[in-house]
């Protein structure tokens, strides 16, 4: 199993550009999550999904969108990039609500 | 509402010394508790988890944590630090909230191991 994979690893965007961060898991997990990690702030939940076709907002959803058309994929869309979205983004998945999360390697995004 | 507080954003220990990383939580329902480790430029990996089976939980790499309900604590310990333990450690609490399992992470503690 590859686990949770994320692409790209690094990206620099100009203000106002858009992009999609890709996340795929091959563990047949129903639950998937997107977090952002800023220095000294821990992880903040952006969006989560409890299964294909079902998504919901987390703590910091503004400026982001997600979709979940398959169990495996959970892409995160930034429509109009802003400097405040400079961060490291992690995708995670879990088998069930009481299980540990499996994290991808992260995407380091800089918006200038 | 639930929250996690990790005391000390940076902790330094000598190689071979005891490692103690502190975590206190609050939760209105019985929680599940986790410790994750993050090495530089990597994602988080599970160290150990508490799911109400036993209050003393053993994890990977010689780490363990004790759930103390009366103190709402879940501190992480290791008897003897190794250079390879240098990393950032996150405590997390997971509990049912509004129909889904909400996970809240602490702000992390960076562990430095001095030779």
Image (cartoon, coloured by chain):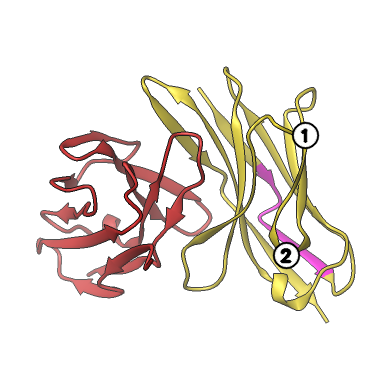
Chain colours: A red, B yellow
Q: Chain of mark 2?
A: B
Q: Local crowd at mark 1 within 10 Å, few (<14), some, or many (≥20)?
A: some
The disc label shown at residue B61, or none = 2
Residue indicated by mark 1: B55
In the image, taking residue B18 as reference, residue B84 lies left or right, namely left
Is residue A84 part of the magenta span, yes or no?
A: no
Q: Which residues are magenta?
A: B6-13
Q: Local crowd at mark 2 within 10 Å, few (<14), some, or many (≥20)?
A: few
Is residue B11 part of the magenta span, yes or no?
A: yes
Q: Residue at x 22, y 74 (%)?
A: A12
Q: Chain of mark 1?
A: B
Q: Position of residue B12 (x, y in %)?
A: 78, 66
Disc on the earlier residue, 1 or 2: 1
In the image, taking residue B108 as reference, residue B56 lies left or right, namely right
Q: Position of residue B81 (x, y in %)?
A: 82, 68
Quadrant of the snapshot with the N terminus of chain A: bottom left
In the image, taking residue B99 as reference, residue A98 lies left or right, namely right
**Most prominent secondary structure in the magenta stretch?**
strand
Q: Is residue B58 shown above or below B52?
A: below
User: In the depicted view, which residue is nearer to us: A89 or A98?
Assistant: A98
Q: Position of residue A37 (x, y in %)?
A: 42, 56
Which element is circle 2 on? helix
Separation (CA) of disc 1 from disc 2? 19 Å
Q: Residue at x 25, y 72 (%)?
A: A8
């Amino acid at each position: 199993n590859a686990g949770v994979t994320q692409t790209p690893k690094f990206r620099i965007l100009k203000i106002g550009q858009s992009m999609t961060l890709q996340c795929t898991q091959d563990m047949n997990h129903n639950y998937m999550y997107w977090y952002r990690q800023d220095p000294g702030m821990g992880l903040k939940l952006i969006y989560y999904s409890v299964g294909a076709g079902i998504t919901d907002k987390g703590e910091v959803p503004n400026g982001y969108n997600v979709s979940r058309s398959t169990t495996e994929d959970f892409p995160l869309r930034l429509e109009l990039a802003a400097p405040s979205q400079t961060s490291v983004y992690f995708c995670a998945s879990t088998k069930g609500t009481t299980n540990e999360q499996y994290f991808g390697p992260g995407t380091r995004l800089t918006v200038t | 509402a639930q929250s996690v507080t990790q005391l000390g954003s940076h902790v330094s220990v000598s190689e071979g010394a005891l490692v103690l990383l502190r975590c206190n939580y609050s939760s209105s329902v019985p929680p599940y508790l986790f410790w994750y480790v993050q090495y530089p430029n990597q994602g988080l990996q599970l160290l150990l988890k508490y799911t109400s089976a036993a209050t003393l939980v053993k994890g990977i790499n010689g780490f363990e944590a004790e759930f103390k309900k009366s103190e709402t604590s879940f501190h992480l310990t290791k008897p003897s630090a190794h250079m390879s333990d240098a990393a950032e450690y996150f405590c997390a609490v997971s509990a049912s909230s509004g129909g889904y399992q909400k996970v809240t992470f602490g702000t992390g503690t960076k562990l430095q191991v001095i030779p």
